Image (cartoon, grey):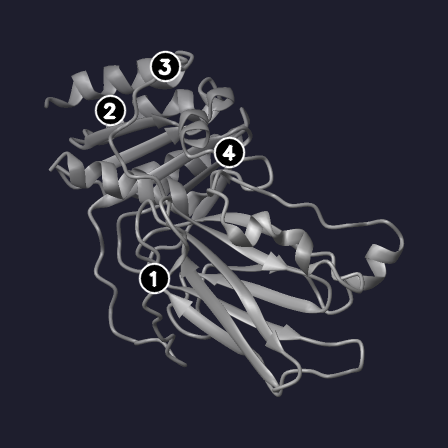
Amino acid sequence: MPVRPILALLGALLCAPAAADEVLAPVERPARIRLFGQNGVSLTMYTNARCEKEYDEEISASGSLSHGFKTLFGKKQENSTIGIPETEATRNLAMRDKLMANPYYLEFPLVPGQPVLLQAQVASASGWRCARDVRAAFVPEPGADYEGEMIRDFDNGICAVSIRRVATDGPPGPIALSSVPRTCDAGAVEAEPLMVMLFEPEIVRYRLAEAGAGIDELYDADDKGSIEDFEEVMAEAPLPAGMALCIVTADAARASPLARRLPALLDARGAQVKLIEASADALQEQWQLTGEQPLTFPLVEYYCRSAAGSRQ
């Protein structure tokens, strides 16, 4: 496709309000996990855990060893869901509520194909603890739902992390667990021919299509400094002919200063890219994400990568 038609389309998409029935590229939704917690249990989730010390996010997924004191003063942890079907574990959650256990669950989206590590610790009222942190790791699949929790057997001194797949037509089933290496491979990371940009109100997050590139961000404001920084980024960004450029924009950011500037900057580069454009709000709604679990850059990148692959 010629350069100028692409840029004309881009300008129209960024400046116009998103249609309520916008059709997104056919991408299977991310994986999801439901984590169970209660007082005395600390469960932490590490996303994209390439090794023990390199991961994307450390999420206090459920509970803490001192959470019981909050329950005494009425600060009970509420369940949080993003649409995972109910199971026997959720339907019978009240059966676990003994001695101020305050059982609950939280649900999180996961990027398919990226390893997830769960690490847990537990303490009893008598001071009993696991001898060490227990952990389990797995690689989630697109569109799949999972449940994870800590298994505690004080009588037999057993601690373990259980991860199971949620089935829509039967009980949860076992999954294949994986291992997370202690150290990461120092080998070079092969660059993907994809640049991703996420325009949100007041901020732009992006990852360049080059080996080892991290997620960068710019303050989206109509001032000289922000515009000059954005111009420098776009002038130096690797944009080889035929590369996929994926732009995901929140509806409230479509007329933001940097979004308005982008078409002219690409035109100045003569960028002959494969354009992928989507509404962040439409993705959030389609994937049943919430204010507590909003659309993140890794999820946007998963969408972009999948959409780019479906167009090849």
Question: Which of marks 3 and 1 precedes in the sequence?
Answer: 3
Give the residue pinned by disc 3.
Answer: 21
Figure check: 166 above or below 164: above
Q: Which mark is residue 119?
A: none
The residue carrying pointer 3 sits among few (fewer than 14), some (14 to 19) or many (20 or more) residues within 10 Å by Cα, namely few
- The residue sitting at 63% across, 60% down in the picture is 37
Which quadrant of the view contains residue 101?
bottom right
Q: In the rendered structure, are the residues bearing label 2 and label 1 in contact, judged by CB atoms less than 8 Å apart?
A: no
User: In x, y percent, where is residue 256?
Assistant: 49, 22
Q: CA distance from mark 3 to mark 4?
A: 33 Å
Asked if residue 53 can be seen in this view, the reply is: no
- The residue sitting at 35% across, 70% down in the picture is 177
Q: Amino acid at mark 4?
A: Ser
The residue carrying pointer 1 sits among few (fewer than 14), some (14 to 19) or many (20 or more) residues within 10 Å by Cα, namely many
Q: CA distance from mark 3 to mark 2?
A: 29 Å
Q: Amino acid at mark 2?
A: Asp
Give the residue pinned by disc 1.
Answer: 139
Q: Nearer the viewer, mark 3 or mark 4?
A: 3
Judge by depth and name the residue closer to the eye, 125 or 134: 125
Judge by depth and name the residue closer to the eye, 192 or 262: 192
Give the residue pinned by disc 2.
Answer: 267
Question: Which of marks 2 and 4 precedes in the sequence?
Answer: 4
Question: Relative to 160, is 115 on the left or the right?
Answer: left
